[in-house]
Image (spheres, rainbow, N blue to C red):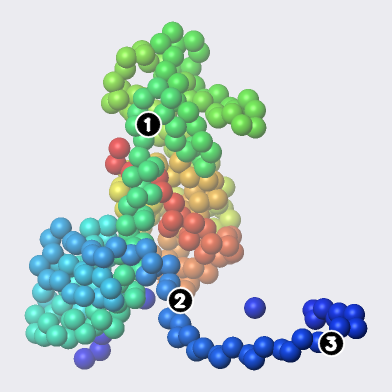
């Protein structure tokens, strides 16, 4: 049955006679072990999925994984921050599943490590909404400052650019010094969403003519797993949290979704459309995949 997987003086003296040379030391052969990869060095001794119902030794690691059977034709492996999940057809013997896991153990262990590192990056990116909190805005660090006196003319919040090479830009919020975390979060996110919508509209209007398409609506999304989407009716949905990232990544998502107005798939023809205005789309896509933004706060 076929298995598929989404894998280094001589010193000459005067007239003195040359002293006798010592006999060469016996050569000793030393056996060396092959160098360990970074993944092997840093992997934990065990991985445990919270819904694990089977355990298997892969390399030097014990992997407790979630095993499910269902109406499918192939064995599927899925790795998330929780751990490894395996899905198999109802008729597939467990021995065949385990043989596949042994065969793909390097891939599984690498993906488990990557998922854990990704979860750590996201946890580090999480914002504690308080006076002095910092987060990224268009790829640059921004600091929140509470201004109880509301010493600015704008409503709610005002952006102040950095005044020196080592200084941070500031988002000044018209809130009391004792404002609770939810109030600070809501005020800051309202400002971020406003900036996101204005920027997204500007970038859509910039790229749509180059791609030969028209979009009908722009809607902001707060999806936890998708940066954007496009509908056949011309509606473009973009995740407002893109505002945390560099403009080059925002532009990639904008071009990606506009290109779907030509092809509602990820066929070679679709990628040709993307490449027509963004030849470096692959490197931007890779950067986007590794980006960590504060989700779900």
Mark 3 and mark 2: Cα distance apart in space:
47 Å
Tell me the residue that label 3 is attached to.
Answer: 17
Q: Is residue 180 visible?
A: yes
- Judged left or right of residue 55, residue 211 is right
Instruction: Using a 10 Å C-alpha cutoff, classify the residue at mark 2 as few (fewer than 14 neighbours), some (14 to 19) or many (20 or more).
Output: few
Q: Is residue 201 visible?
A: no
> Which residue is pictured at 46% across the width and 68% down the height?
270
Instruction: Using a 10 Å C-alpha cutoff, classify the residue at mark 1 as few (fewer than 14 neighbours), some (14 to 19) or many (20 or more).
Output: some
* Residue 189 tag number: 1
Image spot of residue 240 (x, y percent): 39, 41
> Which residue is pictured at 31% across the width and 17% down the height?
179
Closer-to-camera residue (93/11): 11
The extreme right residue here reads 15
* Of marks 3 and 2, the one in the foreground: 3
Q: Earlier in the sequence, mark 1 or mark 2?
A: 2
Tell me the residue that label 2 is attached to.
Answer: 35
> Which residue is pictured at 57% across the width and 47% down the height?
206
Residue 251 position (above or below residue 200) = below
Split into 4 quadrants, where in the image is the N terminus? bottom left
Disc 3 is placed on an element classified as: loop
Mark 3 vs 2: CB contact within 8 A: no
> Which residue is pictured at 42% across the width and 61% down the height?
260
């Amino acid at each position: 049955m076929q298995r598929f997987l989404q894998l280094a003086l001589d010193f000459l003296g005067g007239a003195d006679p040359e002293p006798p040379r010592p006999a060469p030391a016996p050569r000793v052969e030393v056996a060396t072990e092959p160098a360990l990869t970074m993944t092997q060095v840093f992997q934990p001794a065990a991985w445990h999925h919270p819904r694990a119902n089977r355990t298997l030794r892969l390399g030097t690691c014990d992997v407790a994984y979630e095993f499910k059977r269902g109406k499918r034709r192939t064995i599927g492996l899925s790795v998330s921050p929780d751990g490894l999940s395996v899905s198999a057809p109802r008729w597939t013997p467990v021995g065949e599943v385990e043989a596949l896991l042994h065969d793909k153990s390097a891939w599984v262990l690498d993906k488990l490590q990557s998922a854990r590192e990704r979860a750590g990056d996201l946890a580090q990116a999480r914002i504690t909404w308080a006076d002095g909190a910092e987060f990224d805005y268009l790829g640059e660090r921004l600091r929140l400052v509470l201004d109880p006196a509301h010493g600015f003319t704008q409503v709610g919040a005002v952006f102040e650019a950095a005044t020196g090479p080592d200084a941070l830009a500031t988002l000044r919020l018209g809130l009391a010094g004792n404002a609770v975390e939810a109030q600070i979060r809501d005020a800051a996110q309202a400002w971020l969403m406003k900036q996101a919508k204005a920027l997204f509209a500007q970038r859509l209007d910039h790229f749509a003519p180059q791609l030969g398409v028209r979009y009908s609506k722009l809607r902001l999304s707060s999806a936890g797993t998708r940066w954007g989407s496009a509908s056949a009716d011309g509606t473009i949905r973009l995740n407002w949290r893109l505002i945390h990232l560099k403009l080059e990544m925002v532009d990639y998502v904008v071009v990606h979704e506009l290109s779907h107005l030509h092809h509602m798939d990820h066929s070679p023809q679709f990628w040709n459309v993307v490449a027509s205005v963004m030849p470096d789309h692959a490197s931007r896509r890779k950067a986007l995949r590794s980006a960590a933004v504060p989700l779900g706060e």
